[in-house]
Image (cartoon, rainbow, N blue to C red):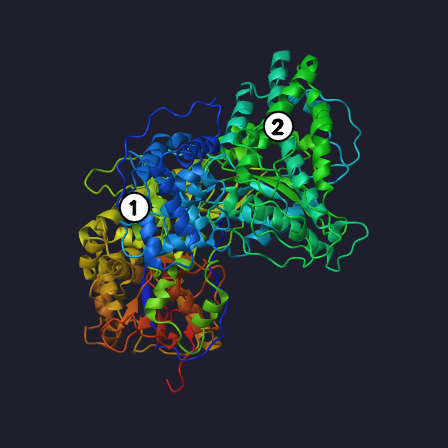
Amino acid sequence: MNISNRAYSVAPTETNWKHIIWFQARDRLQHPVKPREIGLDQVEVVPKPQSPRPPSSPLTPEQHLQCILSRYTTNPDFGAKLWLSTPTGAFQAKKIDIQTRSGFLEAVFRARYYHELIRELILNVRLLPNAFVHDVLDTSQNPTVVRNRVSAETLFRRLDQQTIHLDPPELFLETFLRCAHQSDPTHHTSSLATTIPSPSTYFNQPFYGPSLSLLQGHITVHNNFFTTSAEPIHSNEDKAEEYPEPELPVRDWRKYYIKVLPILQSSGFGKTRMCVQLSTISPGMLICLRHKTQADDKQHQESFPPQDSLVFEYFQRCKNRIFNAEFPTTPEDHERFNQAHLGVLAWLAIYCKTIAFYLEQLKRNAHDCFGTPRRCDSDPRLCWQTIVYQLAAAIYSPSSGFLSHKLFKQPQTCPRIRLVQDLSDPLSSTDTTTTTNSTPTEQPTKQSKAKLYAPMQTPPQLFGTRRLRSVMLEYICKSATELDQDMCRRLAGRLKEPELLVTAIKEYLKPHLDRLEQSAPDKTAKPFFFIALDECGSMPDLLPIIRRVWFHALPTSTWILLIDTNSVLAPLAGDTARKGSRRTHDGSTHRLTQPFSLMPLDVNFSEQQRQKLFADVPTFTLRKLNQLLPTLGRPLWYDGLYRSEQGVIYPLTIIDKLVYPAGWKWDLHTSWMHHDEINQNLLALVSQRIYLEVSSRSDPKSWYEFIQNQIGQHLRFIGRIYTASDSIITNTPSEPPLSAAVAWFFRCEPKETLRKWGKVIQALVHANEPVGFNLGAKGEHGVAVLCTMAIDVAASQIYSDVLKQSLLPSPSTSSIYAAVFGLVPVRRWLKSLIGGRIHHAASSFPPSTTHVGSGEDESHVSDAMEEDSVASSSADLEFESISPNSAFAAAGTMDETSALWRWADRAWLNFKHIVRLEDQVNAQKVLDAEELVQLWFRKAAAQCISNQSGWDFLISVYESNTNEAPGDAEMFDKVKLSYIAIQVKDCIKQPSKAVRDGEVGPRLAMAEGK
């Protein structure tokens, strides 16, 4: 039973709906199956300054921080020196007992120098590096405050893990502050009022799932679509559209436009983390171009990494050169057009030069592996992967300032290459290989602060440069500025020439690009290089320029990756991207590359856990099963921001991620107003409860705007984006943590629960025409709403007290657990759904286990339906004169002492959402327990595809031995699972008795003797 992640455009038919719902309870299972895939006190602070940092500030954020810290490390006052030596003692004295070390720390935090330093940092918060601010200060408060300190044990553990030395003291003080104030996810356990940890805390969690290999394969496949020898193709049509270019020989046709790949998916799938991880197997790095976050923007405070301000400001200057016209026509337009492109060209050239420089240095260090003759017995590909990993480890090491902890797990490496573990120190000649024939590494000399930030002729040393990543980006931006100015001087007389760009690329960019791509040994398996631009939607006007420069550069194996979750998809993969790129319009010969969106779900649910779940012998308690919920869905839900250490989800935090803006609340006391914002939130909420398919029959503009908004702000999943049109395949796959949080958000006082659903139904009605929901020809979605509403009302009645407790400002984990995971008896659900009168269609209970797929039964049902379709008009009139209630009464009802009611008292439901099955379930197939295990584990009910025979909904049921709900300590036993099947009939006439008495739902594997 696979959950469908597809969306189809099917227009519903209009008809008068009359629905008859059959409930048929199956007896319990007893058949083994094989598993199948499926704080402390805060210091006094002063308000932060309101004026932002001037764009032309002469110092970088890193330099500002060093200037502040140096005023304390160089303070000649004896008290200051004593204060600075105190944390040094705690850092060095790893063998001293914990009480003594704790005494050192308390002396640090009580001293006036500490409070003065924190106050100065807060006053200059806008001038400091974003990574440091995220770890030490809490800018979501107004005014900014210092983050709560971690426990002494956590601080000692962090300090003991650091590989940096105490010299220079500014670096030590910076590291000490980041370790002392960056919140720890393991302490966010019992209360939502706990200080929310920094997003950087969770960025370095283990990276699971196949997304990296899928991205690698996606790029490799697309790389083969490009011919390596083809020059850009030009035609008279192109010249009229854009600008005249020199005639170049046409050697081959290029199917795709250029090696620029958008990576698009809604938030929480780890797109940024994936591209950082990509640098361990392919040379490259990630640059973040996000806008500066606002203190009152709660949703964006969860983002990491912060903006790379130097690169952002550089590209901002390039963007400011862009003229307003779509294509240049006048000489003045061509001048600004060329200037904007030269700026991007210069940055890309220096980037390629820098990465090539580091790879060449690492190859020289590993002379046995890459020298001539080669003396290494390892596979050349392993040697190459080793130096690629070493480059990534250096760029993202703790000493680089990107994160305070080691990010990557070391892969298999060549034994001839000794990896440098302490990246803050210069690499000695004896540390590179295990043989004496190695070429010594270039030794960086000690540099003064002024010299460190002075213009450099070569990139900063890979080893021995503190905050390497920041210094490297500073070098790239400064060198690119110099190259840009040099090109403008040299080409001053030609800036108005339309053909200047091609010439400049061949002279200034192409040599560095070729040098980079030729750095890989010949025996390696077609490696590729990359630069990833994160949050590139902040500069949509710059993307066509980047594409155009890269088009003319003709890279062989170097890709530009564009990452964004912005709701405006067009600049990355839609109509804007096509219009802003050469020859990608309708009828053209080139296409944009297919965006990568294949980000897997459930990556934190391990294979070992999967095997235990489906094991024949019970291995999980019901509580443990619930605590595994955060492992499902997108990786985001496994972060400590959204769950306790024990695995209990924080529903309100999850809801804040789904709705926009964060903190949105239900408005149940005002009359309905057609505000688009309210519509979007309500539709996002209900999309996580029932399966809502969006068709293409509505107005394309309103449909596209709705989809963009749902993807960018409400976590809707991207299945595929077509680059040749504005078509998008999108849906909401099963994400149990999200659906459980939304179910909790619906549940409150029973009357208010009904009002919430009333608002949602109004939103569905209002949006149906402009959005184009496919609500099903038989009214399946109406039944889905009723079933889900019924379980919410029943849960609101049963768990009203714990629901109120879970809404308190500081709820306990136990109250949240009870409010989220409380079970609902089938009896209470049925009464909420259809009242106390139940029509018993079958002649006896329990239902017959006769195979519904047998020829005799199948023929009988078929004949009965045919008889019904040709029933006499007098019979129809007779039926129409009888009300539904009287019809049921005439057929007979069940009293509350019946076997059905007794079973309903000990049968329990837990579904929070309804998932769409991908395939039809064969009526002749016996339904195994594993199908129901999946539904119970995911807190889901199943909705079949439209041509499913025999049933439309399947709800997993867990039976208890008594009328009491099964306890959390009880072992989960799949033998106790059964189901409720629902069939929805859209009939003009009353179904015949044979159809009504026909068996509903698939057959279960029954226990022996039953």
Residue carrying label 2: 479
Q: Position of residue 278 (x, y in %)?
A: 58, 48
Residue drawn at x 33%, y 45% is 108
Residue 985 is left or right of residue 288, and the answer is left
Residue 783 can be seen, yes or no: no
Spot the residue most to the right.
Answer: 373
Residue carrying label 1: 760
**Above or below for 46 versus 651:** above
Q: Crowdedness of circle 2 by 10 Å Cα count: few (<14), some, many (20+)?
A: many
Q: Are marks 1 and 2 in contact (CB under 8 Å)?
A: no
First along the sequence among labels 1 and 2: 2
Helix, strand or loop at label 1? It is helix
Locate the C terminus and report the quarter of the image it occupies.
bottom left
Q: Number of numbered discs present?
A: 2
Amino acid type at image mark 2: Ser
Residue drawn at x 18%, y 51% is 751
**Above or below for 155 versus 122:** below
Q: Position of residue 423 (x, y in %)?
A: 57, 47
